[in-house]
Amino acid sequence: MPVRGRWATPGCFIAAVGSSLPNTRELDDRAVARASLVAVEWREQGLREAGDLVLADPAALPRSKIVELGEILAGKARGRTGEDEITIYKSVGVGLQDIALAGLAYRRIVGG
């Protein structure tokens, strides 16, 4: 059963990390419609692989609402601007990020 938008209380954060297939969803249209933004690792991949984005009604989830985490961290896109905003992180996983993190962990462990 997908996360229902009616369950979201003002100010909540939803981490949607359970589904990464274009034909499955874990969020209903009301959830994405109520969110002020949907953060993804990589917009292009999310729009191709995440059913929550692929299958969403465009009226509920305009593309302008989808932002990359890197853009938020770099100050190029806004994150949460008010305490009552509902925000979503939709992850599909980016293999390159996994490799980079594994490399960083390895270097820290071996002291390199």
Image (cartoon, rainbow, N blue to C red):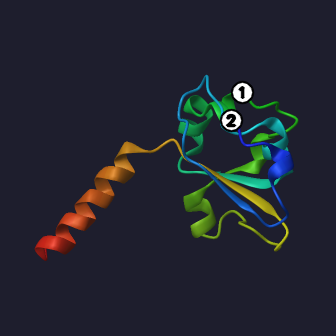
Q: Which mark is residue 106?
A: none
Which residue, as the protein is rendered here, is positioned at the far bottom? 111
Q: Quadrant for residue 59, please give it.
A: top right
Residue 26 is situated, as x and y percent measured from the top left of the image, at 66, 37
| Quarter of the C terminus within the rendering | bottom left
In this picture, is 59 found above or below 109?
Answer: above
Q: Quadrant for residue 12, please give it.
A: bottom right
Q: Is residue 12 left or right of residue 59?
A: left
**Pointers 1 and 2 in contact (CB under 8 A)?**
yes
Residue 103 is situated, as x and y percent measured from the top left of the image, at 23, 60
- Secondary structure under badge 1? loop
Residue 42 is situated, as x and y percent measured from the top left of the image, at 54, 46
Q: Which residue is mark 2?
A: 53
Q: Is residue 56 left or right of residue 102?
A: right
Query: Cα distance, mark 1 to mark 2?
Result: 6 Å
For badge 1, the amino acid type reads: Leu
Marks counted in the figure total 2
For badge 2, the amino acid type reads: Leu
| Quarter of the N terminus within the rendering | top right
Residue 35 is situated, as x and y percent measured from the top left of the image, at 80, 53
Q: Which mark is residue 55?
A: 1
Q: Residue at x 67, y 35 (%)?
A: 52
Q: Residue at x 58, y 68 (%)?
A: 73
**Residue 77 or 58: which is nearer the viewer?**
58
Q: Residue at x 21, y 74 (%)?
A: 108
